[in-house]
Amino acid sequence: MKVLVTGGLGFIGSHTVVELQNEGYQVVIIDNLSNSSLDVLKGIVAISGKTPIFEKLDLKDKVQVQTFFKQHQDIQGVIHFAASKAVGESVEKPLLYYENNINTLVYVLQELEKLNVSNFIFSSSCTVYAQADVMPITEGAPIKMAESPYGNTKQIGEEIIQDTCKVNAKIKAISLRYFNPIGAHESAIIGELPIGVPQNLIPYIMQTAAGIREELSVFGDDYPTIDGTCIRDYIHVVDVAKAHVIALQRLLKNKNTSNFEVFNLGTGTGSSVLEVIQAFEKVTNQKLNYKIVNRRSGDVVSAYADTTKANEVLGWKAQYNLEDAILSSWQWQKSLNAV
Ligand code: UFG
């Protein structure tokens, strides 16, 4: 069965391609290589022993998207990761984000309308909840005003899909709202590849420990939390990847209860920034250089998932904990250093 993975050479996309191939799916990857590299394709082949079809294609090019789908009419499912994802950059370049994340989604959905089978998995984010009032966050929590153009593209993206599903019963979709995906494949052959100075906590910790960065800045220790630092739900990328396969199978087997469903993907456990640092120091047995600095603007105080719906309805549960994920990130970082 042929499955299209857009952005399949990115961080979560590449891990999902591995899991799909492990389950026997024939994978077609589209990626424009704007934030990824062909080495990732080699890594996928090395891990799974299977070579996915790869097309370097920019989804912003509507004609190319049309041509691609004409050539691949036997696609049974689409997992759509391709998007820009840097919150800060989205504030600086909102139109770039609306073009990259919204236009492309529309073009893909327009082609799905023409197919006989349209099973669509959307890469969404807990950012759609902004600062939720109640923890843990359920899928029923209100969608609040987005705090960045990036967050807005995920909210609008979900609305576009929902509106499309309403008028076209043939299109079935699941939106997966990730909390904070971290970690790497156990082989340490694929993992996260931040470009330039990392903006996210785990890559910054890894590069600091590897001596690439001098010290980690912890953004604020005066939040109303157990130790004053922000709380997040860090989830292993392999768990996130497996959830995509399960979600796709749910649609393929017609187990969905409506043609647009949403699920949170998290562990259900919130960890503070200082707890993440402690976990890193424990599993690697080394001290991390860090200092407390001012808050980063736009950070929510706390965000962790209620995973009941994902566990009971989707039938998925995170298998790895924070320490497992951090250790896998460290092994990945060490393999990068060795190159
Ligand atoms: N942090 C630091 N120092 C750093 C980087 C991060 O202290 O150098 C802190 C942040 O202040 C935050 C926590 O670590 O408290 C996690 O920050 P990340 O940047 O790793 O993750 P965010 O929760 O800010 O962002 C993630 C995704 C976004 C998504 C957002 C939704 O990266 O794509 O969750 O809440 F929009």
Image: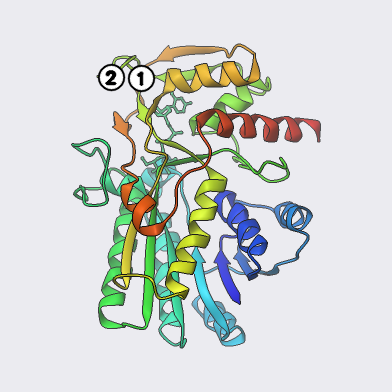
Please report contact status of discs 1 and 2: CB closer than 8 Å, yes or no.
yes
**Can residue 238 be seen by looking at this rendering?**
yes
Spot occupied by residue 111 in the image (x, y as percentages of width and height): 46, 81
Residue sitting at 32 percent across and 29 percent down?
297
**Can residue 82 be seen by looking at this rendering?**
no
Which quadrant would the C terminus be assigned to in this image?
top right
Left or right of 287? Residue 126 is left
Mark 1 Cβ inside 8 Å of ligand 1: yes
Residue sitting at 73 percent across and 44 percent down?
189
Q: Which residue is mark 2?
A: 223
* Type of colouring: rainbow
In the image, 284 versus 23, the foreground residue is 23
Spot occupied by residue 235 in the image (x, y as percentages of width and height): 48, 39
Quarter holding residue 204: top right
Q: Which residue is mark 1?
A: 229
In the image, 52 versus 69, the foreground residue is 52
Work out whether 85 lies above or below 276. below
